[in-house]
Amino acid sequence: MSPTGIAVAVLQVILTIAVAPLLVGMMRVIRARLEGRVGAPIRQPWRDLRKLLRKQRMVSQNTGVVFSIAPLVLLASAALVAGIVPFLSTTSALDQVGDLFAIVYLLLLGTVFLSLAGLDAGTAFGGMGSSREMTIAAIAEPTLLVAIFALSVSTGSSNLGAIVADTLANPSKAASPASMLAFSALAVVTIAETGRIPVDNPSTHLELTMIHEAMILEYSGPDLALVELAAHLRLVVFLGLLANLFFPWGIATTAQPLHLLAAAGAVTVKLIVLAAVIAAAEVFIAKVRLFRVPELLAASFVLAFLAVTVSFFLV
Amino acid sequence: MVGAALAVAAVAAAAAMIAGAVLPARSRVVWVGVCTALCATAGGAAATAVLTGSSTFQANFPNLFPLGGVRIEFDALSAIFSLATAIVAVPAAIYGIGYSAHGPSSRTVQIAWPLLVWSVMMVPAAGSVTGLIAFWELMALSSLVLVLAEHHHNVEARSAAQWYAAMTHLSLLAIVLALVVLAHQAGGDSFTAVRAGAGDLSPATASVVFLLSLVGFGAKAGVVPLHVWLPRAHPEAPSHVSAMMSGAMVALGVYGLVRVGWDLLGGGPTWWGAVVLAIGLASAMFGILHALLSSDLKRLLAYSTTENMGLVFIGVGAAGMFAPSGNRSLASVALAASMLLVINHAAFKGLLFLGAGSILSATGTRDLDRLGGLARRMPVTAATFAIGSLAIAALPPLNGFVSEWLLLQSLVHSLPSNAAVVAVAMPVAVAVVALTGGLAAATFVKAFGTTFLAMPRSVEAGQAHESPRTMQVGLVALSGVCVALALAPTALTSPLRRVSAAVGGLADGAPIRTNGVYLQLSGIQAGLSPLLLATGLAVLMIAVLAVVRRGRLHRTVRDIPAWGCGRTVQTARMEYTATSFAEPLQRVFDDVLHPEIDIDVDHHVESRHYVQAIRYRMKIRDGFEHRLYLPLLAVARRWGDGARRIQNGSIHRYLAYSLITLITVLVVSR
């Protein structure tokens, strides 16, 4: 674990935290423009967070320790993942600390804590949100892990740095059937895990359709700020995984400041493209019923499964 | 050293049984607990000595039984299972002191408890067929007595004990058949002789022996379809006994399977592994789905034992598939994953059952829909149960994650392979492990959330108090073990190397290497550092806290009522219950589970437009029990009815039977 490696990891965490709310703001602007509205400025999510952070902490009666620490665990786990995922450079010190499996389970840790917090207030909405969130998390898990399986077969490792380096060395891999199938499977899971349309609607407050929003209904002030920031960060982490696992070009393989700067530019462009596609697509599709979501995830699982078996039959 | 420790264990067990027989009720419980803990500690010390040194221990007691003596052979494979036993038995014995004080303190129970601990400890140490069967039967009988411990006020315990007795003896029958064939072939009953003689077995005989041992040991491990006794017997036993049965006893099924299949028989064709893998996959899915939908806390934990044994079987089966194709290093990793899971499972399942026992003794109920709000009333139980839940849901940075990670790594790196069965089986296995992990997270969010969070759903839960000190000691000790295993799994690298060296037919070499804090696998380019993950999480949490809670304003917290759409009072009836929490997943898996749902609506007397009460009943039937066991039982009953006609009570008829038998015997044996 070299000092530059640690520096890269810390830099990644700070940059992703800084960029995440801006990216969400941009998605809102794109959506608003496509719907014929002006929309709030791109930096609005940061303003909201700043406002929330200044408020007094208010905690519902009946809640306990779990309710208080859940936002911390959620944000810390998402931030740790942001340090592991190769956003800027493959030389992050955390690369050997955890691989893709560790990332999936770290994100699940955050989900579990938030679900427990949803149950802690003892309201019907909180329980409803928790129950739905865990349902989706549980059935998204096979797709995630089998897609990772597909990615790691050709590389022989599930470590992110190794996968990225392998794709950089063999650019034709990005266009292989296995890689494209795994990409589409992961894209569906990204939608489900980050609570976007058609699985969940981040801007709804209609009681019967909420998932994420129902779970965090009792949070306010600084706690809400942490939960919101963590949600933004998870979106960036998933998009960054999609971007750099399948299209790693532009990423730095050293820790030189100039290379890192170029990599930051490259990853920002990739994130903006992916986020813009999602935001634009959301305008044209409707949220599906909760009990149709498993069908969507089952389809993505089939894609992931094909990705693994294709790499067997074609290699 | 090993011999002395095992001798101390035997003496302590004997002392505990004598204390249970002669002392008066109050001091009996204390002395039995202390001596049992001593016995388990000594056994754990012996296991540790074998796992850290390179020595094995052997001893012979040729005159212990009239026909064949008992031989003790304590190698690394034995030791890892004895270590798992010690991990759960020491805290369970201390916990038992407090738990039995107002519960099962009768002489029978207090004699059977140390006997169970000692026999579970000694089953893996047996080095001969006779020894294994003797300890196995001691274990079965003492646990049967303990399942019946509370039969006088718990009717369920009686039928549970019947199922358990029948299944455990069917399992014994299969094991005896398998081992007798082996011993007969070898001309001796010590494992050394059996191992040497197994090479001469024809492949068909070897496979029959393997399948018999799979049935026998699989029944003890509680894997599908031989699991039916497990969700009945484990919940009805006193909780420290449940912890022992679920944490340590069922794992001996895995021990037996590995010992007979891949040590004594020396391994076999790929399909052995494939069968074990398939059983593991089915058990993992079946176990976790039923655990998810169970609203009885101890039953939920029992089903989750079936799930975890399924995961262990997946590892063993995968190793059995890799080894014949020559991929020994991957087989070692898969076996190491299984063994680590056995150790981890002993720690977290033991912890969870002890926690369930605290809840049961504080509230008198195991029904999740009647619990709630216990975190405030029972903080120690809540904190330790939380650690156990996170560990069993395989979440980092706790110990369950490390074994899940190892298992996934061994499955993922089986490709590219040139065998089509591996190429199809492994993605399925990864998907099942993943789905099991996700559902386990949902299950334990449900279990912890509805038990400890929000408001109590019954008067009993509202009046709960923290359990006595001895029980807390047991809980804290086991959660300490979970944390230690989570942060320093690297300490187990050389023990796991010795285990894989002990299973000649399956593995060789060092499955896990370590450089300081990183875990590295042999032949696999992948690393993990649980310690650094935990450190990273802690550092980031502190950093976030430091940034957010700077101002004075944030240190004062205002209590406000929960938001409730304009209603004025919040009652516990508005909360989500365990049943409602699992409802979406129940709908998703509707086609697999076929739940029976009854909804009764009572209308108001005055008008049918007003509803007075709604009753909702949901019952999940065990498909195997319904389609497999009940028809079998019906057939057995018909046979019994037929036999009744022959046996009508008339002494003349019986004399006639004797005469006929005598004549037949004389004619036949002439």
Image (tube, coloured by chain):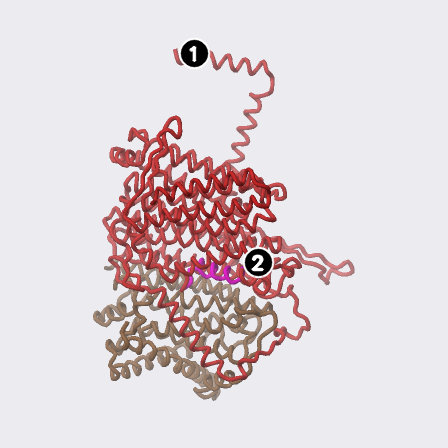
Chain colours: A brown, B red
Q: Which mark sits nearer the N-terminus, 2 or 1? A: 2
Label 2, label 1: how far apart the Cα atoms are: 66 Å
On-image quarter of the C terminus of chain B: top left
What residue is drawn where x is 42% and y is 34%? Answer: B134
Compared to residue A89, the image places residue A43 above or below, namely below
Q: Could you say whether the residue bearing mark 1 is in a helix, strand or loop?
A: helix
Q: Is residue B279 visible?
A: no
Looking at this view, name the residue that lies furthest to the right.
B606
Q: Residues within 10 Å of mark 2 (few under 14, many from 20)?
A: some
Residue B432 image point, x, y percent = 40, 55
Residue B394 image point, x, y percent = 42, 60
Which numbered dot is residue B121? none
Q: Taking B551 as reference, is B177 left or right? A: left
Segment colored magenta: B381-396
Subunit of mark 2?
B
- Residue picked out by circle 2: B579
Which numbered dot is residue B666? 1
Residue A119 belongs to the span the image colors magenta: no
The count of marks equals 2
Disc 1 marks a residue whose amino acid type is: Leu
Q: Could you say whether the residue bearing mark 2 is in a helix, strand or loop?
A: helix
What residue is drawn where x is 32% and y is 50%? Answer: B51
Subunit of mark 1?
B
